Amino acid sequence: MKVLITGAAGFLGSHLADWFVKNGDTVVGIDNLIGGYRDNVNQKVDFHELNLIEYEKILLLFEGVDLVYHCAATAYEGLSVFSPRLVTQNIVDASIATITASIAQKVVRFVFCSSMARYGAQRVPFTEEMVPLPQDPYGIGKVAAENLLVNLARVHGMEYVIAVPHNIIGPRQKYDDPYRNVAAIMINRMLQGEQPIIYGDGTQKRCFSFVQDDLHPLVKLAIAPVVGEVINIGPDEEFVSINELAEVIGRILDFKVKPIYVKDRPQEVKLANCSADKARRLLGYQTTYTLEQGLREMAAYVKKRGPKPFDYHLPLEIVNEKTPDTWKDRLI
Ligand SMILES: NC(=O)c1ccc[n+]([C@@H]2O[C@H](COP(=O)([O-])OP(=O)(O)OC[C@H]3O[C@@H](n4cnc5c(N)ncnc54)[C@H](O)[C@@H]3O)[C@@H](O)[C@H]2O)c1
């Protein structure tokens, strides 16, 4: 099978690429490196450093492709409130280019990586039949891309599935990025002797999933009879607060945690947790890593690659009194 993975240098895309390479499939990867690391890319991947938005440049790469995993996105939910143009461009424009190229080249199945942000602030746990109510530009962009996919795939007869991963942790996740990935930021800071920074009072809760646990159900989407489905991917156990997350990381790194609390970020959802019932039922989803085990693997990865100073590599488009000082004044 020929598989094309967008975001192949990113966290999830690179793990998926490894899996398909190991399975003996031909893997084409596209990434413009706005988010991932070049060294995440498996050497057997036919890799192209390209911006998906440049449709004419990517179109030929879809020739003969059976399956597309569209993982590329500027996965920056908090930042999307302050850099909405940049973030949505790499979600909406990049997605429509990928969808169009896939249909034009007769791809059989398209797996779209959406986000829990599609649910907004509805009651938890989020279930797939809920009407999307995103409350920030990142989530709005994801829902727009989903709608474009559903519309065009139905008209032109391409199989599609919408995967909804959430709060994934593990090796290869970008950890020197001040704009996202709370666990990775905390690990990178603590390894440099710095206290974790927490937005708000730290009682906001999330369910973290270890990347290997997400990989199995995601890979099953390639052939399972799930066309047209939306499926949450990730655990619904161990719903923890950000304060608890900091404590667990402190314990793993033997670091005495005294968090630095800063004002909360606009539009941040307090309670976000997805039901895994549908993934269990349709894909045999199982959680095999506890939060602590997942965080240990991630800390080992950051230690091995080396803690790094944070890189403010993306511009803030809107700077006003609502913009977090951590970003405005580069405090992370
Ligand atoms: N990691 C999570 O916890 C999580 C949670 C929910 C949803 N998701 C979604 O899963 C997907 C993968 O997330 P991830 O954690 O691997 O993120 P990531 O940032 O590690 O990977 C995304 C990759 O897409 C690339 N990219 C972005 N815009 C591009 C463009 N215009 N052209 C080409 N490449 C581009 C980036 O360089 C990056 O390498 C994303 O769509 C994300 O929104 C992830």
Image: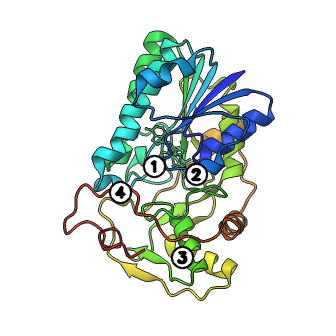
x, y (%) of residue 109? 59, 21
Q: In the drawing, what numbered circle is on residue 243? A: none
For the C terminus, the image quarter is bottom left
x, y (%) of residue 241? 51, 70
Going from N to C along the chain, the mark reached first, 1 or 2, is 2
Instruction: Please name the residue shown 47% across and 10% down the image.
Output: 156
Residue 131 seen in this snapshot: no
Find disc 4 in the rendering and name its residue: 79
Q: Amino acid at mark 3?
A: Arg
In the picture, measured across the screen, residue 279 lies left or right of residue 145, that is right
Task: Say how the picture is coloured.
Answer: rainbow
Q: Amino acid at mark 4?
A: Leu
Q: Amino acid at mark 2?
A: Tyr
- Nearer to the camera, 291 or 73: 73
Find disc 2 in the rendering and name its residue: 37
Find disc 1 in the rendering and name its residue: 75
Real-space Cα separation, disc 1 to disc 2, in angstroms: 14 Å
- Where disc 1 sits, the SS reads loop
Residue 167 seen in this snapshot: yes
- Nearer to the camera, 59 or 283: 59
Find disc 3 in the rendering and name its residue: 189
Instruction: Please name the residue shown 50% across and 78% down the image.
Output: 196
- Where disc 3 sits, the SS reads helix
Going from N to C along the chain, the mark reached first, 4 or 3, is 4
In the picture, measured across the screen, residue 293 lies left or right of residue 241, that is right
Real-space Cα separation, disc 4 to disc 3, in angstroms: 19 Å
Q: Residue furthest left?
A: 320
Mark 2 CB in 8 Å range of ligand 1? yes
Q: Is residue 235 above or below residue 194?
A: above
x, y (%) of residue 288? 76, 55
Real-space Cα separation, disc 1 to disc 4, in angstroms: 9 Å
- Where disc 4 sits, the SS reads helix
